[in-house]
Image (tube, coloured by chain):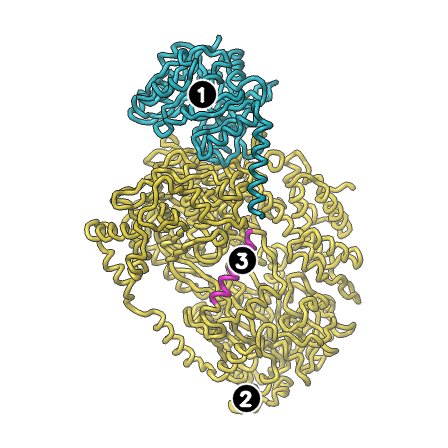
Chain colours: A yellow, B cyan
C-alpha cells in the first residue's frame, strides 16, 4: 500500500524525512487519514528499525489525537458509536499496549471511527511509542561496556570486586581511612532545546549539543564561599552490614539483607542504594537472588586483609554517606544526578574500578561514571539528560551527541550513541579572563518554584518525532544560537552571551515548549529589566523549565547590587504569586565559581579519618544514648577521635553547641503548629461532633472507599435514546426560538454565573496547596491568564454583546477565600465591571490518616496503571512505606503533621450551592437583581464554558429545575457519567459505581456545568426567596437535604515540605458530598444536554495543556474571551 | 632462535616450602614440585634453568631435583620486591636470549602428548617473539590473575596478538579494555603462569625497578609496556594448571596428575570406593 507518511519516515533525504506530519494532515480528508493510519499500523508492525517504528507510532498517536477528531463530529440524528472497551482499557493499565491497540482497532472496525475510540488509540500509541524508546535506552545502558558484567553477577561467590587495601589500613587507634569525594554540579550555558534527552541524542546526534560548565556553589549571604555542592564519603566498618547515611536528609539505614538494598522507596536513601548497585558493589544481577548480604560483604571486604579487632567476630561492612551542601531541590543544576555520580565515583574508586584512589579521574573513567549514573537513575525510577553528570568533568566542556560506529552496541539500532562525547575547553579556547568575566557577570538564583519537568521532556520528544513545523524551525534556531554562544565565549563577549541566552528563552525555547515560561519568570525578568535597564544583559533558563534555577547576566560593575536586588524582587514577586503558583521554598541567590577539576577524591587517614561535621551532628546523639560497650571498637575509637577533634579543630569549634541543641531541642515546633491548627479550626467553625462521627464511622468500617460503592445488585445502564438533548446541534444551528429566548433572558439580566473555586485542584499541583483558580495556566491574548480571568473575560464578552453585565459568583473555601479576595482586589477584579461576589465556604473538614484497608483498596483492588518495570518496583516499595506510615501514625486519627492549612480540606462541591443560601450571597444578589432566574454553575477548570444563549434558552423553555451539560466520553474522562441507575436517569460518581467496568458502558461524561432555576431549586429545599434572610430556616433546610446526600471517603495527596525544597507526598483521607448526586433526588426535574467537547472538557492536569493548546481548544477559548484592556 | 634457558620463580616468602613438596607424577614416580617443573622445562628443549629463591633456600631445593641439579642455577632474590623483580634477578643468567619462564607454585597438565612448555616454546621460536600462555577465565576470577586483551591472529584459533595487559583487573576495566573477539561473554584471557620472554622484558623491568625505588614491580606492568614495543603473542592453552599454593592445592594437583597418568584406573577405583564407603556408612 502506498503511503505518503511512510515515505516521509523511510526517506534517506533529510529534507523529506524532516517533513512535518501536521503539514500533510492539514489538507487530508477523513478517508485519506484513515488509509494512512491503516498503512502506518501495518508498517510499524513489520519494520525492524526502531526509529521507524517509533516515528510511525507517534504519527498514529498524533493523527488520532489531533487530526481525526475534528473530522468525526456526529451528524444529525446520529448517536456516537464505539464505546471504549473495558478490556482494552485494562490492557493499557497493564502495559499490554499491543493488545490494547488490537482491542481498540477491533471496535473501530466494527463501529466505524469515532472520537472516543480515537482517544483510546491515541493514548495506546503514545504509550507504546515511549515504552519502545525507554526499552531501547535501558538496553543501551545495560550494554555499555563496563556495565555488562554487573548484570551477570548473581552470586556472592562470583563477585569479582574487592575493596582496595588502602581502605583497610587501620590507624593505631583503630580507625579505618575515609575516602572522600567532592563533585561540582553542572550548569548548561546553551540550552539547545532540551537536546540532551537520550531519545533525541540517539536519533539526532547532530542536534544534541550543549555547553556545560562545572560549578561550585554557595548560598549568597549564608555560606562563606563556593564549594563543591555534593560530597560522598566511604569507609570500611567493623560490622558486617551496609550503613547508608544521607546527612542532608537526616536519614540512616543499617542494611543487613540484600532485598532491602533493592527497596528504593522505603526511605530517603534510594539514591545511595542506586549508587551502591550501579557501582557494582552490589551488582544489579544480585536482585532477587535470595543470597545473603553478609556473604557478599565477606567477599568484597575480606577479613584476611585485616582481622577484626575486639571480637565483633562478624566481618566487615561498608558505610556510604552522602551530603548536599544546602543546595535546594529543583535548582535545575542536576544536583541529584551529580550526587549519584559522586557516590558512584567514590564506590568505584574504593573497589579498584578506577586507576587512582584519589585525585581526578581519567577520561574513560569519567565516561563510565556517567554511564553508571544513567543506570542508577533508571534503577531508582528517575531520569535526567545525558549532560547531567557533567560535573564529573572539569571546567567548561562541549558535550555533543555521537554517531554510533560499528564498534558501538547501538550500531544498527539507533543513529547515535547513548553516551555523548566530551570536549573540555582549555584555557587556549576560553581564557581565564573570560571565565572570570562570566563569573563576575552572572547571578545564579533559585526562584523557589519546584516543578515536575517529566511531562516537558515527553513533549519535546514527541514534537521532535512529529517534526511539528514551528517547533522544528525552533530547534534549528536553537542550534544556531548554540553555535553563536560557543563563538561568543571564545571571543570573551559575555554581553553577547546574555543577549543570545535571552533570545533563546523568548524564541526557540518557548516555541518548542511554551510551558517553559510562567508568570513568575516573566514578572521577575520585567522587574529586573526595569531596575537595571541596559546593565541587565540577559536572562538564561537553566534545565527543563524556568521558575527554579535561573541565571541573570549583568554588567559586572552592578553584579553585587544585582544579587541583593534580585533577591528582593524574587521575594516580592513570590509573595504576590505564591497562592497561584507552586513554590517549594523561598527564593535564594547563589555565589558560584567555575570548578576546574571536576570530581576529586582524597583519602583521610589516621587522625584525619573523620566524616563531615554534619555526619556527627546526625549520628552522635544516637550513639551517646547507647552503652559504650555495645559500640564496635572502630566506633569507640571514632568517638574518642571526634571528641578530641571537637576540642582542638577550628572546623568543629561550634560542634558542642550544635550537638547540645540537637539532643535538647530549643523549641517544640510541632506544638506551635498544633496550636495554630486548633485556632484555625475554631475560627472556621469546624464541626467537632460531625468530625468525630465521621472518624468513628471510618474506623469502624461503616464508611470507606469500598463503602462508597452502590450495592453490587444495582443495575447500571447507558442512556436510552431520547434521554439526552443534542445541544451540539442546537448550538451549531442556533435554533432561532431558543436562542431568542436565551438572548432575551441575558438582556434582562436573568442569569448569573457561579464558578466553583473552593478546591485547590490537588491533581493540578499534586497536592501543593495552590489555589487553582488563580493559577496563570496559559498565555492567552499574549499574557498569562488565570482560570478566573478567563471566566470573567467570557462573561465580559457576553455581557457586552447583550448590553447587560452578567453577575459572577466565585465560591471559595477556607483555603481559597483570602487568596482569591486579595488577588482580585490587587488586580481590580481583572477589570470586570459586572457584579462580582465571593461566596465563602462555611464547611471545613479535618483530614484523617487513611485506613490501611482503604490504601490497599485504592492500590490493590482498584485497577491501577502499571508503570515501567523499575518505576513500578519503586512505586510498590513506596506504597509499602506509606502503609507502614499510616499504621505508625494511627489509622483513622486526625492528620495534624503538616502546616495547618494542609491538614484541612473542603468538604465537596455539594456544599457550595447551599453556602450561597447560608452566607447571604444569593440573597444580596437577588436584591440587586430581583429578575434573576437562572444560575449557570461550572467548575473552575471547564474553561470552554460560557453563558450560551441557545443553551440558556433551551433550559428556560424546558421548565426543568436543572439542565446538566454532558460530553461524549474520551479515555481520559474518568469518574462516572450519565447513567440509568436501576432505571432512573441520573449522574453517578465514579467512586459510587459498583464495578469499575460499568463506567465503560456510559456514553456521556458529566462536564459539571449545570443550569439551575433558582426558584425551583429553592422549592426543592422547601424554601422561597422570602426565606433567604431566615438563617435558622436555611440551616434546617440544608441539613435536611444534606442528610439525603451520600458521603464519600476519598484519598487525596498532600505535600509536606521540609528541608531545602524537599517534598513528601502523603495520601490522606477526607470526606465529601458532590452536587451531581442532586440528580438522584426524587423531585429533581433534571434534563441532560450533550455539548461540544471544546465547551465541556476540563483541565485537570498541567500535562493536558500542550494537547489543549495544539488541538484548537485554546483558540476556541480565546475566541470566547474579551480581555480587559487595562 | 632456539630457546635454551628457563627461569623458575620460587622466591615467595610465604611459599618457600611449596616446591619441596613431593607428588607422584603421571609416570608413577615420586617427584618434588620443583622436579616436575624442571622436567616440564626440559621437555621443551631447555638446557639451563635458573631458579629464583629466597636467600638460604638453595640447598634444600638442590636436594629435591635429583639428577637435574647440574642444570640448575640458584639465584637468591635478596629483598622481596615483587614478581617482576624476581624475574629481573635472572638478567645476567639469560643475557641477550629469550627464555622460558614458569612460576614455582603451579603445575601444568597438558591435554595432549606435547607438554605445555613444549607448545609454548615452539610458537615463540616460530614467531620469534614473546609469547604468554593464557587461558579463558571467568570474570569472577579476575582478582587473582593478570589478563590480556588483543585480537586473534588470522588463521589461528589459539593465537592472539596482545595489545593490553592489566594485572588483576576489575571486570569493569576488563570489559572496557580486554574484550577479545570470539570469547564467551564474561570470559577473559588470563595468564597461565608460563611465558617465553624476550630480553626487552628485562630492559623494561630494569627501568621500572630503577624508577620505583623500594616498590614492588609486577611482571604485568612490564608486559603491558612490552605490548606497545614489540610483537607479543598469547597462546591459548587447552591444558590445565593447578595452583599448589591454595587450600587443597596440592591434593588437587596430585589428583589431576594421577587421573591423567599411568595409574588413572587405580585412582578412579579408589575414589569410587572412598565415596561409596563413606556414603554407605552415612546411610547405614
Q: SS for tag 2?
A: helix
Q: Give the residue at mark 3.
A: A875
Give the mark toward the camera: 2 or 1.
1
Give the mark toward the camera: 3 or 1.
1
Q: Position of residue A500 (x, y in %)?
A: 45, 42
Chain letter of disc 2 in the image: A
Q: Mark 2 vs mark 3: which is more N-terminal? A: 3
Q: Are marks 2 and 3 on the same chain?
A: yes
> Is the residue A900 above or below the residue A118 in the image?
below
- Whole-angstrom CA distance, mark 3 to mark 1, is 57 Å
Q: Are marks 2 and 3 in contact (CB under 8 Å)?
A: no
Give the mark toward the camera: 2 or 3.
3
Structural crowding at the residue carrying mark 1, measured as other residues with C-alpha within 10 Å and reported as few (<14), some (14–19) or many (≥20):
many
Pick the residue in front: A698 or A370: A698
Which label sits on residue A322? none
Q: Give the residue at mark 2.
A: A1034
Q: Quick check: can you spot residue B206?
A: no
Q: Give the residue at mark 1.
A: B102
Q: SS for tag 3?
A: helix
- Whole-angstrom CA distance, mark 2 to mark 1, is 104 Å
- Seen as rendered, the residue at the extreme top is B1
Structural crowding at the residue carrying mark 2, measured as other residues with C-alpha within 10 Å and reported as few (<14), some (14–19) or many (≥20):
many
**Residue A735 picture quarter:** bottom right
Amino acid at each position: 500500500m502506498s503511503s505518503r507518511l511512510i515515505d516521509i519516515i523511510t526517506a534517506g533525504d533529510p529534507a523529506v524525512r524532516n517533513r512535518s506530519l501536521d503539514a500533510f494532515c492539514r489538507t487530508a480528508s477523513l478517508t485519506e487519514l484513515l488509509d494512512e493510519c491503516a498503512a502506518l499500523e501495518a508498517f510499524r508492525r513489520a519494520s525492524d528499525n526502531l526509529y521507524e517504528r517509533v516515528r510511525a507510532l507517534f504519527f498514529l498517536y498524533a493523527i488520532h489525537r489531533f487530526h481525526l477528531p475534528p473530522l468525526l463530529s456526529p451528524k444529525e440524528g446520529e448517536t456516537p458509536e464505539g464505546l471504549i472497551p473495558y478490556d482494552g482499557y485494562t490492557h493499557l493499565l497493564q502495559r499490554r499496549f499491543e493488545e490494547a491497540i488490537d482491542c481498540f482497532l477491533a471496535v473501530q472496525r466494527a463501529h466505524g471511527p469515532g472520537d472516543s475510540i480515537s482517544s483510546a488509540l491515541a493514548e495506546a500509541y503514545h504509550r507504546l511509542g515511549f515504552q519502545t524508546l525507554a526499552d531501547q535506552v535501558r538496553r543501551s545502558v545495560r550494554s555499555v561496556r563496563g556495565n555488562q558484567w554487573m548484570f551477570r553477577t548473581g552470586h556472592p561467590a562470583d563477585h569479582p570486586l574487592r575493596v582496595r587495601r588502602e581502605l583497610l589500613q587501620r590507624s593505631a587507634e583503630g580507625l579505618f581511612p575515609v575516602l572522600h569525594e567532592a563533585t561540582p554540579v553542572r550548569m548548561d550555558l546553551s540550552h539547545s532545546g532540551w537536546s540532551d534527552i537520550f531519545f533525541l541524542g540517539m536519533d539526532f546526534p547532530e542536534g544534541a549539543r550543549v555547553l556545560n560548565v562545572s560549578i561550585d556553589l554557595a548560598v549568597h549571604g549564608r555560606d562563606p564561599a563556593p564549594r563543591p555542592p555534593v560530597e560522598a564519603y566511604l569507609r570500611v566498618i567493623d560490622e558486617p552490614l551496609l550503613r547508608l547515611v544521607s546527612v542532608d536528609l537526616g536519614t540512616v539505614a543499617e542494611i543487613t539483607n540484600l532485598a532491602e538494598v533493592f527497596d528504593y522507596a522505603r526511605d530517603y536513601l534510594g539514591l545511595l542504594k542506586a549508587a551502591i548497585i550501579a557501582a557494582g558493589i552490589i551488582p544489579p544481577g544480585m536482585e532477587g537472588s535470595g543470597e545473603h548480604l553478609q556473604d557478599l560483604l565477606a567477599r568484597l571486604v575480606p577479613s584476611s586483609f585485616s582481622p577484626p579487632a575486639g571480637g565483633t567476630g562478624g566481618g566487615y561492612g561498608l558505610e556510604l554517606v552522602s551530603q548536599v551542601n544546602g543546595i535546594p531541590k529543583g535548582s535545575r543544576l542536576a544536583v541529584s544526578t551529580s550526587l549519584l555520580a559522586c557516590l558512584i565515583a567514590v564506590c568505584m574508586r574504593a573497589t579498584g574500578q578506577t586507576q587512582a584512589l584519589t585525585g581526578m579521574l581519567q577520561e574513560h573513567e569519567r565516561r563510565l561514571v556517567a554511564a553508571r549514573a544513567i543506570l542508577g537513575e533508571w534503577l531508582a525510577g528517575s531520569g535526567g539528560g545525558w549532560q547531567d553528570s557533567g560535573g564529573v568533568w572539569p571546567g567548561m566542556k562541549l558535550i555533543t551527541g555521537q554517531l554510533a560506529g560499528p564498534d558501538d552496541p547501538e550500531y544498527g539500532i539507533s543513529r547515535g550513541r547513548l553516551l555523548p562525547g566530551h570536549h573540555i575547553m582549555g584555557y587556549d579556547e576560553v581564557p581565564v579572563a573570560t571565565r572570570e568575566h562570566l563569573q563576575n557577570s552572572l547571578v545564579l538564583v533559585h526562584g523557589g518554584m519546584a516543578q515536575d519537568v517529566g511531562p516537558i521532556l515527553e513533549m519535546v520528544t514527541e514534537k521532535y518525532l512529529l517534526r511539528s513545523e514551528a517547533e522544528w524551525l525552533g530547534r534549528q534556531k536553537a542550534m544556531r544560537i548554540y553555535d553563536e554562544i560557543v563563538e561568543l565565549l571564545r571571543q570573551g563577549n559575555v554581553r553577547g552571551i546574555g543577549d543570545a541566552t535571552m533570545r533563546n528563552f523568548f524564541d526557540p525555547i518557548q516555541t518548542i515548549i511554551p510551558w517553559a515560561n510562567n508568570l513568575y519568570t516573566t514578572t521577575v525578568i520585567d522587574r529586573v529589566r526595569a531596575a537595571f535597564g541596559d546593565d541587565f544583559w540577559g536572562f538564561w533558563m537553566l534545565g527543563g523549565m524556568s521558575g527554579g534555577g535561573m541565571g541573570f547576566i549583568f554588567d559586572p560593575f552592578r553584579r553585587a547590587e544585582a544579587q541583593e536586588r534580585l533577591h528582593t524582587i524574587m521575594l516580592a514577586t513570590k509573595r504576590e504569586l505564591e497562592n497561584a503558583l507552586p513554590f517549594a521554598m523561598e527564593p535564594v541567590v547563589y555565589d558560584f565559581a567555575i570548578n576546574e577539576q571536576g570530581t576529586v577524591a582524597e583519602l583521610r587517614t589516621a587522625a584525619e579519618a573523620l566524616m563531615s561535621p554534619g555526619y556527627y551532628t546526625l549520628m552522635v546523639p544516637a550513639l551517646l544514648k547507647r552503652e559504650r560497650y555495645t559500640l564496635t571498637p572502630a566506633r569507640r575509637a571514632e568517638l574518642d577521635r571526634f571528641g578530641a577533634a571537637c576540642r582542638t579543630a577550628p572546623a568543629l569549634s561550634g560542634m558542642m553547641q550544635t550537638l547540645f541543641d540537637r539532643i535538647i531541642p530549643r523549641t517544640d515546633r510541632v506544638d506551635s503548629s498544633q496550636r495554630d491548627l486548633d485556632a484555625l479550626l475554631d475560627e472556621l467553625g469546624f464541626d467537632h461532633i460531625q468530625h468525630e462521627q465521621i472518624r468513628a464511622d471510618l474506623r469502624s468500617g461503616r464508611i470507606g472507599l469500598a463503602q462508597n460503592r452502590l450495592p453490587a445488585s444495582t443495575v447500571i445502564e447507558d442512556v436510552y435514546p431520547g434521554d439526552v438533548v443534542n445541544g451540539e446541534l442546537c448550538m451549531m444551528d442556533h435554533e432561532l426560538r431558543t436562542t431568542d429566548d436565551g438572548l432575551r433572558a441575558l438582556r434582562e439580566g436573568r442569569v448569573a454565573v457561579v464558578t466553583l473555586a473552593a478546591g485547590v485542584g490537588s491533581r493540578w499541583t499534586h497536592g501543593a496547596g495552590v489555589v487553582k483558580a488563580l493559577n496563570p495556566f496559559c498565555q492567552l491574548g499574549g499574557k498569562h491568564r488565570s482560570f478566573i480571568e478567563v471566566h470573567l473575560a467570557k462573561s465580559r464578552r457576553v455581557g457586552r454583546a447583550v448590553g447587560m453585565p452578567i453577575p459572577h459568583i466565585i465560591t471559595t473555601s477556607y483555603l481559597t477565600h483570602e487568596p482569591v479576595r486579595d488577588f482580585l482586589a490587587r488586580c481590580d477584579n481583572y477589570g470586570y465591571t459586572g457584579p462580582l461576589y465571593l461566596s465563602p465556604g462555611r464547611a471545613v473538614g479535618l483530614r484523617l490518616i487513611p485506613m490501611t484497608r482503604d490504601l490497599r483498596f485504592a492500590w490493590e483492588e482498584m485497577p491501577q496503571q502499571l508503570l515501567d518495570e523499575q518505576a513500578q518496583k519503586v512505586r510498590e516499595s513506596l506504597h509499602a512505606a506509606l502503609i507502614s506510615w499510616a499504621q505508625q501514625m494511627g489509622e483513622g486519627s486526625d492528620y495534624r503533621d503538616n502546616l495547618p492549612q494542609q491538614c484541612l480540606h473542603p468538604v465537596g462541591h455539594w456544599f457550595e450551592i447551599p453556602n450561597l443560601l447560608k452566607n447571604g450571597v444569593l440573597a444580596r444578589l437577588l436584591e440587586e437583581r430581583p429578575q434573576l432566574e437562572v444560575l449557570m454553575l461550572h467548575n473552575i477548570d471547564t474553561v470552554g464554558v460560557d453563558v450560551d444563549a441557545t443553551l440558556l434558552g433551551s433550559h428556560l423553555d424546558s421548565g426543568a429545575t436543572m439542565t446538566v451539560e454532558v460530553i461524549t466520553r474520551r479515555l481520559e474522562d474518568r469518574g462516572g457519567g450519565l447513567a440509568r441507575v436501576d432505571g432512573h436517569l441520573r449522574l453517578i460518581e465514579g467512586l459510587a459505581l459498583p464495578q469499575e467496568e460499568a463506567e465503560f458502558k456510559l456514553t456521556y461524561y458529566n462536564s459539571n456545568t449545570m443550569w439551575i432555576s433558582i426558584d425551583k431549586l429553592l422549592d426543592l429545599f422547601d424554601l422561597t426567596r422570602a426565606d433567604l434572610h431566615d438563617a435558622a430556616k436555611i440551616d434546617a433546610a440544608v441539613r435536611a437535604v444534606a442528610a439525603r446526600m451520600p458521603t464519600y471517603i476519598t484519598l487525596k495527596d498532600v505535600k509536606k515540605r521540609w528541608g531545602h525544597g524537599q517534598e513528601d507526598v502523603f495520601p490522606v483521607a477526607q470526606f465529601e458530598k458532590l452536587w451531581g448526586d442532586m440528580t438522584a433526588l426524587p423531585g429533581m426535574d433534571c434534563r441532560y444536554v450533550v455539548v461540544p467537547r471544546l465547551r465541556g472538557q476540563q483541565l485537570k492536569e498541567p500535562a493536558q495543556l500542550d494537547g489543549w493548546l495544539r488541538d484548537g481548544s485554546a483558540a476556541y477559548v480565546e475566541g470566547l474571551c474579551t480581555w480587559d484592556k487595562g | 632462535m632456539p630457546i635454551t634457558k628457563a627461569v623458575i620463580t620460587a622466591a615467595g616468602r610465604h611459599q618457600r616450602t611449596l616446591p619441596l613438596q613431593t607428588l607422584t607424577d603421571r609416570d608413577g614416580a615420586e617427584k618434588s614440585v620443583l622436579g616436575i617443573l624442571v622436567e616440564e622445562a626440559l621437555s621443551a628443549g631447555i638446557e639451563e634453568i635458573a631458579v629464583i629463591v629466597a636467600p638460604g633456600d638453595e640447598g634444600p631445593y638442590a636436594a629435591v631435583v635429583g639428577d637435574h641439579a647440574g642444570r640448575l642455577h640458584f639465584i637468591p632474590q635478596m629483598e622481596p620486591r615483587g614478581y617482576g623483580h624476581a624475574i629481573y634477578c635472572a638478567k645476567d643468567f639469560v643475557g641477550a636470549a629469550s627464555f622460558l619462564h614458569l612460576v614455582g607454585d603451579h603445575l601444568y597438565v597438558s591435554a595432549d602428548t606435547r607438554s605445555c612448555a613444549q607448545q609454548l616454546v615452539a610458537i615463540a621460536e616460530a614467531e620469534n617473539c614473546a609469547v604468554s600462555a593464557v587461558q579463558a577465565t571467568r570474570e569472577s576470577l579476575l582478582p587473582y590473575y593478570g589478563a590480556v586483551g588483543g585480537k586473534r591472529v588470522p588463521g589461528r584459533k589459539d593465537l592472539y596478538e596482545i595489545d593490553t595487559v592489566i594485572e588483576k583487573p576489575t571486570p569493569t576495566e576488563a570489559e572496557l579494555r580486554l574484550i577479545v573477539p570470539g570469547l564467551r561473554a564474561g570470559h577473559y584471557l588470563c595468564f597461565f603462569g608460563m611465558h617465553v620472554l624476550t630480553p626487552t622484558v628485562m630492559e623494561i623491568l630494569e627501568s621500572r625497578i630503577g624508577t620505583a625505588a623500594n616498590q614492588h614491580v609486577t611482571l604485568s606492568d612490564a608486559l603491558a609496556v612490552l605490548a606497545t614495543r614489540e610483537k607479543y603473542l598469547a597462546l591459548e592453552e587447552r591444558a590445565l594448571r593447578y595452583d599448589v599454593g591454595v587450600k587443597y592445592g596440592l591434593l588437587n594437583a596430585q589428583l589431576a596428575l594421577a587421573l591423567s597418568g599411568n595409574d588413572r584406573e587405580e585412582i578412579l577405583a579408589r575414589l569410587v570406593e572412598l565415596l561409596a564407603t563413606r556414603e554407605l556408612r552415612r546411610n547405614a
